[in-house]
Image (cartoon, grey):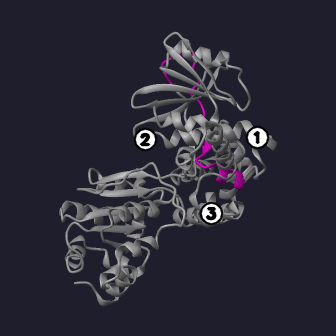
Amino acid sequence: MIPEYVLRVILLDNPWLEGGDPVNWYSGFLPDYYIPRSLTLTADNKVCLVVGPRQAGKSTLIWKTLSEVKEPCLYINCEEPAIREWLVSPAEFIAGLKTMVSPGTAVFFDEIQQLNEAGLFLKGLVDRRTGYKLYATGSSVFDLEAATRESLAGRADRHLLLPLSLNEISREIKGAQAVVARKKSFLLEKLLIYGGYPPVYTAEQPEQELIGLVEAFVIRDASDRFRIKRPAAFRKIMELSASQIGSLCNYSEWANVAGISSDTVKEYAGMLEDSHILRFVRPFVGGKRAEITSSPKIYFLDNGIRNQMFGGFLKFASRTDRGALQENFIFTELYKSINPLLDSIRYWRSKSGAEVDFVVEKKGVVTAWEVKAGDCRGKITRSSRSFIEAYHPSDFYVVNQKKYPEKKIGETIVHFLSPEEVSTVVNLT
């Protein structure tokens, strides 16, 4: 049965169990201004697991999903010490659950990674086929652990939730074409400078929110999670990464600047990637001898976090890093449109110096992307043409400041897009 001290915590978190209105209770977990996300959640015979960095909106997305069906949900806060002591045996938990709610009820485990054997616990619930609808949020690296992956294989639908995309924040824009374009341009500027973390995007003082985010979960959480012995060096690696977005990584150089070994640099960089703060983009290798298969390039998954670490918050038009910042933003939009487990984003560089920013393989189809901060005047570079002639992608996209008529090179369609149009295109491909 449920220990009395645990029951007190559950009743405190779930007042509807004592006769309250579940619908009103749900509303307390939702922000006044909710921006609909692209992910659709369901929980049938598996756990619906939402992972990602803190403050990306994981819990809010589940609350919104549950509130729309207007059915009761049992909320289990795994950060509570009493709850963690209780959630050891799946069988005992189910026995206690049946005394509170009927089968078919949604059960929401928040911050499930706080349990010592979270993967095994969820496995035990799924394998018993109790009929309860199971939802869970996990930290950014929760499902990267080998034991968790093995336990939840075939038992969880994993969803990666990242900061807001331009498509998500501009979905409800209405009005004449010129008005829509103007509003979307304003929103693009906001994402370029402050990024898309929901509390930052909706804040009156986004700079202050970003300071808090970096200190609270990028530095402190990473230090706690990975037991970093030299937090100052870890911060320095973040700053160096932020200063070199779109560039090749040079671990030896970073090691000299930070005063640590190259192996430690690689370890810290891996931690940042596991935490969904940045991504290392590897070279595209398509079988051509002229390709270079060297160092990865580095991109942040949120422009705001990058600008907090390096670059500041000047308006886009006044910045000296416009090209790198726009390239980083386009990467984030592309990355949010793919399934990282099945698809890939790479860069291409040949020994002769030809380059293409991004080569995207999505659902078996290869497309390529070139990003220009200025006006390309409807022309493509010699590097772009070399890639097209070598690999014949179905589509080649040139992102610049203006839209131009598409053209055809062989079987490849070349599209010229403004940055505002990228979000629509990537959600259609």
Percent across and percent down for residue 402 are 68, 28
| Quadrant in which residue 401 is drawn | top right
The residue under the point 19% across, 64% down is: 131
- Report how far apart the C-alphas of labels 3 and 1 lie in the structure: 23 Å
Magenta region includes residue 306: yes
Identify the image quadrant of the N terminus: bottom left
The answer to the question of whether label 3 and label 2 lie on touching residues, with beta carbons closer than 8 A, is no
Secondary structure type for disc 2: loop
Residue designated by label 1: 321
Q: Residues within 10 Å of mark 1 (few under 14, many from 20)?
A: some
Percent across and percent down for residue 419 are 63, 35
Secondary structure type for disc 3: helix
- Report how far apart the C-alphas of labels 1 and 2 lie in the structure: 29 Å
Circle 1: residue type: Asp
Circle 3: residue type: Leu
Q: Is residue 220 left or right of residue 132?
A: right
- Which residue is at the far top? 410
Q: Which residues are magenta?
A: 285-309
Task: Tell me, for residue 213, which label it has, or none.
Answer: 3
76 shown above or below 420: below
The residue under the point 33% across, 84% down is: 6
**Looking at the image, is mark 3 or mark 1 earlier in the sequence?**
3
110 shown above or below 193: below
User: Quick one: 14 or 227, which is closer to the camera?
Assistant: 14
Secondary structure type for disc 1: loop
Circle 2: residue type: Asn
Residue designated by label 2: 339
Residue 249 appears in the rendering: no
| Quadrant in which residue 407 is drawn | top right
**Looking at the image, is mark 3 or mark 2 earlier in the sequence?**
3
Percent across and percent down for residue 398 are 62, 25
64 shown above or below 383: below
